[in-house]
Amino acid sequence: GKPTNINNVETLSNVSAILERGAEWYAGFGTEKSRGTKTFSLAGNIRRTGLIEVPMGIELGKIVYDIGGGLSGDKKLKAIQTGGPSGGCIPARLLNLPVDYESLAEAGSIMGSGGMVVMDEDTCMVEMARYFLSFTYKESCGKCAPCRIGTGAMLGVLEDITEGRGTMNDLDLLTDLSETVGKGALCGLGQTAPNPVLTTLRYFRSEYEDHIRHHRCPAVSCASLFTAPCQHACPLGTDTPSVMALVRDNRLEDAHRVLLQTNPFPSICGRVCDHKCQFKCRRSTLDESVGIRNIERYVADHSVPPDLVVPAESRRERIAVVGAGPAGMAAARQLRLRGYPVTIFESLPEPGGMLRYAIPEYRLPPKVLKREIEAILNLGIDLQVSTCIGRDIPWMQLVDSYDMVFLAVGAQKSAPLNIPGEDLRGVQGAMEFLRDVRMGTVSCSGERVAVIGGGNSAVDAARTALRLGAANVHILYRRLREDMPAQKEEIEAALEEGIGIEFLATPTALKGNKGNVEKIVCQRLELGPYDSSGRRKPIPSASGSFELEADRVLAAVGQKAEMPFRGRNHGIEVTDRGWIPIAEGTLSRTTHPKVFTGGDVATGPATVAEAIAAGFRAADEIDRIIRYRNQEPPWTAPPREVFNIPAELPEEAEEMPQERMHQRHLKSRRRNFSEVEQGYTVQQAARECGRCLRCDIQTETEMKEESPARQASAH
């Protein structure tokens, strides 16, 4: 006979303060429509978790970074879920959002019970929607059909998507079901239950599409879609656990064959890949990830690759590939292995694209590059170097002369600084500088060199200038060190070699003397509001500006593609940013029926592994279209070589850090281009492979607990 007391702990915690200081005092916090304070339970992938009380209207970013201390580990912020299980998932790009009732509702979320879950890049938003909906489905009282039946139907669709059975029609179905449940449910639980689904569809739709179209979970979280996280994270799908087991068994030749099944450049990738696989390695939850890239290099450097056999079938359709970088070489290889005559056109004197002309020798020795490129050319591919399409051969002449054209010219030009003085002598793009160095036409002896930018090209240019005799080298970067897109190990190496990095600084003008650059005028910056990347935007600081003396200025603030067609695009769409978009629903098609594209020219600057994968996709699509037009059956890939992979599980994983690769001594490397990293020894390789947890091996218990889709995939 007693009613439920709906005054919860949060209400009771405010009563004494309001009674003591008055309603006006309490209403002085917050915004006009959302007054007072709010208590949140801060949880998830954040350094400081717990209960917090904040004024209404505080920005999400201040809660995450100023109060919560930022994300735990080296992961990037992906989303924040507010309001408990019925709340919405807000993307990192909305960190400036005020936390009040109206703003949260506009973003698709709610204040709710005051839950706030911070999610990093390892969080799958599809799985999060499924997880939260499973809670509200179980909590439904069952009184009304929209909630009782609708949430169950939505949960079933989400389970299908996370387990690889989803279709694109499911996305419209989820939207329809969400609207029906939200409008038709009788109580707040049912009315808000669709929020996690609607917001993840609104802000993270591409993740749903990846699950459905490619059976890939970008966060490498949905275990039904893969066996080992490292293999799933790799753009090429390299069978890393098998390689680890074979190296541990001292079967390097077999390990090399496994690598070549998915990657024609294992020695190159073993040196310069950004190793996405290692960021998803489960070993990192114990101590450090397995050194997968280092093992790949070890295998390629210590074994002899097998010769590839070109099929007897010789097709009449001729394929032209424009660009001899990783995307172009990969596509040419796959097409040649299917019997097509392939010609590669390269404007520079040697093949390799940015691998040869943008990555310095101390990271990627020419002999390593030459070995793996020659293995592809030896398949019978025609290579025409120093042949610029659009200059030496008209674009339309090329298109008319071949059945299909794969455009893989990369992003070989540096973007301009767009500041006064950029036309002074001594000012150059970092990409052009690195290319000139590889062609032997540059000296920096005694010069003061400044590099503007924070990516790999900036760090490569700085370390290269140092080796060419520069008196001193500085990098100017407009954000903080943790924001630099360059690989962490490359930044550390640059600092070790004596390169200075000026953070929170940007050039505003270049000053010269007699036509030569002499000084850089730099604006001091400070961190302001959050931008669309979820990072604080650099804004001018009150501390003003400073000048940096420089005889050579290298710009590494972005890259552009140089198209082979002049003036007119000849039916090929080019975006405002200068990239060639891939037609929706295709792998590599442009708006021209005979022209395909992939790699940096389609996506903007990306990684070597992603470029290789783009080349593979283009080859698949070109071959499929040709055979379809000829009314031929699809190409059947020859069966992959099967290896007896040792199934030895570690008895107990003890904490043991990743093996550190020996590097050339600092004094001996600063003034020459000898390779810095020396590779693993036999003993190091064995120990590192022993750290692998063998995620690909499933126990009988795991198989019984998993879904039919997962079991089918494993078998």
Image (cartoon, rainbow, N blue to C red):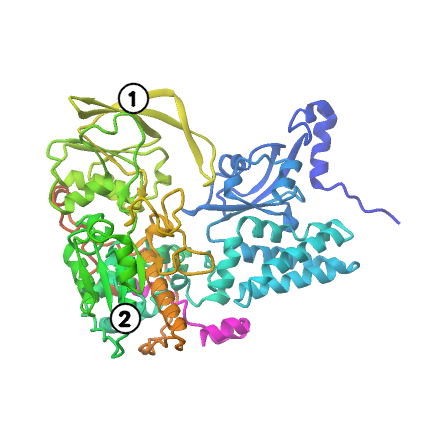
Q: Is residue 111 left or right of residue 316?
A: right
Q: Mark 1 Cα within 10 Å, few/some/many (few <14, many 20+)?
A: few
Q: Which circle's residue, 2 or 1, is located before the other in the chain?
A: 2
Residue 165, compared with residue 30, is above or below; it is below
Residue type at tag 2: Tyr
Which stretch is magenta? Answer: 688-715
Does residue 372 appear left or right of residue 408 in this picture?
left
Give the mark toward the camera: 2 or 1.
Answer: 2
Say which residue appears at 50% left-offset and 61% top-offset.
Answer: 211
Q: Is residue 707 magenta?
A: yes
Residue furthest to the right in view is 1
As drawn, is 495 to the left or to the right of 196?
left
Q: Which residue is mark 1?
A: 546
Q: Residue under circle 2?
A: 340
Q: From the top left corner, tell me how far across and down residue 444 is, in percent.
A: 13, 35
Identify the image quadrant of residue 40: top right
